[in-house]
Image: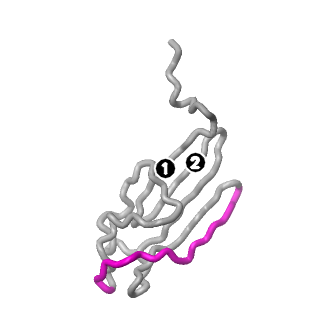
Amino acid sequence: MCGGCVQEEYPDRGSTCLETGSFLLNYVSCVQCNKRDFVLIVNKTAEEEDGEEIITYDHMCKNCHHVIAKHEYTFSVVDDYQEYTMLCMLCGRAEDSVSVLPDDPRQMAPLF
């Protein structure tokens, strides 16, 4: 992983969790070839472990094949919620939780 290729390491992305893709606004240029071109997604794997789906891949410079960052995305269902996380030097860090119920109990207003 390369901190020289990104504007900010592990930026806070709030609840934006990317299963695939790249956060190109955070990409400065490749520190090895000094070019700002497409970022390839390589070595993508998907595993399931204890009910948790884990997707990992590498962001790689199209020109010199320098590995810019390693991306990890997880998905799981905990109780009545779908839980998402993302951790990547390029794309950032994020968490999200979505209710599987029609009405999210966390969003309901108290009756009194």
Which residue type carries mark 2? Glu
Mark 1, residue position: 95
Count of all numbered marks drawn on residues in the image: 2
**As displayed, is residue 109 above or below residue 47?**
above
State whether residue 80 is above or below residue 61. above
Question: Which residue matches tag 2?
Answer: 83
Look at the numbered disc 1 and give the secondary structure of its residue: strand
Residue drawn at the location 68% of the way across and 61% of the way down: 48
Task: Please check the rendered image and state whether residue 67 is part of the magenta-colored stretch, yes or no.
Answer: no
Left or right relative to 39: residue 96: right
Image point 44% across, 56% down: which residue?
93
Start-end of magenta stretch: 33-50
Q: The N terminus is located in which quarter?
A: bottom left
Task: Describe residue 110's horizontal placement relative to residue 24 as left or right.
Answer: right
Tell which residue pokes out farthest to the right in this image. Answer: 50
Horizontal and vertical percent position of residue 89: 41, 66
Q: Point out the tag, 2 or 1, that comes first from the N-terminus.
A: 2
Q: Are marks 2 and 1 in contact (CB under 8 Å)?
A: yes
